[in-house]
């Protein structure tokens, strides 16, 4: 299973990092051009935004590819249904009653989570299902956990459609 590798390089003329993307490995991994550890050197805002972009691009184009972001301890709550484990989560996401959709993200909020370097990421936006005339509003929360190798995986994922 492949997922996002995030190379963070701080250009000498700019204060904010430049993000480059490549697919390989398992989990969301940060690497820096410096000798510091990846988790300590990564900008949380950049990690959250890169994760969200990668997650929804993969969901919209290759749902089975999301498996590398989850582990056996991961849990998805999808519209109240609880699913545990990477394989079961991917099975749920690939069995949804629509095959093609496009997510449009409106907001991304994040907070650091605990001393182990985790992160809470909250997303709101709309979901346009192919063949449907109206987009659906959604909210989704991810609890990303860091690993000793400086990568992140999704420990918790909660998804809800917003009906109004």
Image: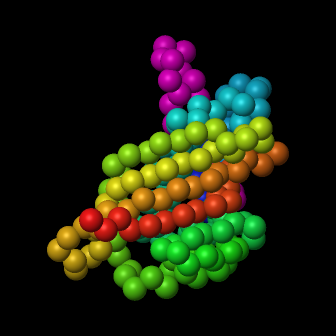
Front-most of residues 139 and 146: 139
Q: Does 15 lie within the magenta span? A: yes
Q: Is 79 or 143 nearer to us in this picture?
A: 79
Vertical relation: 55 (above or below) 100: above
Looking at the image, which residue is at 53% across and 36% down? 46
Instruction: Give the vertical position of 124 relative to 111 (above or below).
Output: below
Which residue is at the far right? Answer: 148
Tell me where residue 111 sits by quadrant: top right
Q: Residue at x 78, y 42 (%)?
A: 116
State the extent of the magenta-drawn residues as a range: 9-28
Q: Residue at x 49, y 66 (%)?
A: 159
Q: How many marks?
A: 0
- Residue 33 place in picture, x, y as percent: 67, 28
Q: What residue is at 47 percent from the left and 59 percent from the top? A: 140
Q: Quadrant of the C terminus?
A: bottom left
Which quarter of the rendering shows the N terminus?
Answer: bottom right
Q: Nearer the viewer, residue 4 or 163?
A: 163
Instruction: Specify the principal SS of the magenta part.
Output: loop
In the picture as drawn, the residue positioned furthest to the front comes out as 164
Toward which corner of the image does residue 127 lie, by quadrant?
Answer: bottom left
Asked whether residue 22 appears in the rendered view, the answer is no
Q: Position of residue 27 (x, y in %)?
A: 67, 56
Quick check: 104 left or right of 32? left
Taking the image as drawn, is residue 118 in sight? Answer: yes
Is residue 121 part of the magenta span, yes or no? no
């Amino acid at each position: 299973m492949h997922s996002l590798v995030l190379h963070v390089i701080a250009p000498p003329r700019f204060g904010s990092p430049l993000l480059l993307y490549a697919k390989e490995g398992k989990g969301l991994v940060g690497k820096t051009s410096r000798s510091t550890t990846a988790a300590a050197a990564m900008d949380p805002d950049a990690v959250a935004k890169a994760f969200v972009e990668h997650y929804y691009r993969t969901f919209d184009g290759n749902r089975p590819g999301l498996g590398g972001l989850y582990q056996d301890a991961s849990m998805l709550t999808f519209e109240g249904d609880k699913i545990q484990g990477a394989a079961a989560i991917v099975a749920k996401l690939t069995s949804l009653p629509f095959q093609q959709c496009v997510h449009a993200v409106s907001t991304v909020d994040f907070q650091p989570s605990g001393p182990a370097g985790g992160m809470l990421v909250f997303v709101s936006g709309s979901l346009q299902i192919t063949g449907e005339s109206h987009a659906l509003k959604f909210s989704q929360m991810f609890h990303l956990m860091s690993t000793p190798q400086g990568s992140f995986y999704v420990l918790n994922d909660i998804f809800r459609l917003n009906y109004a």
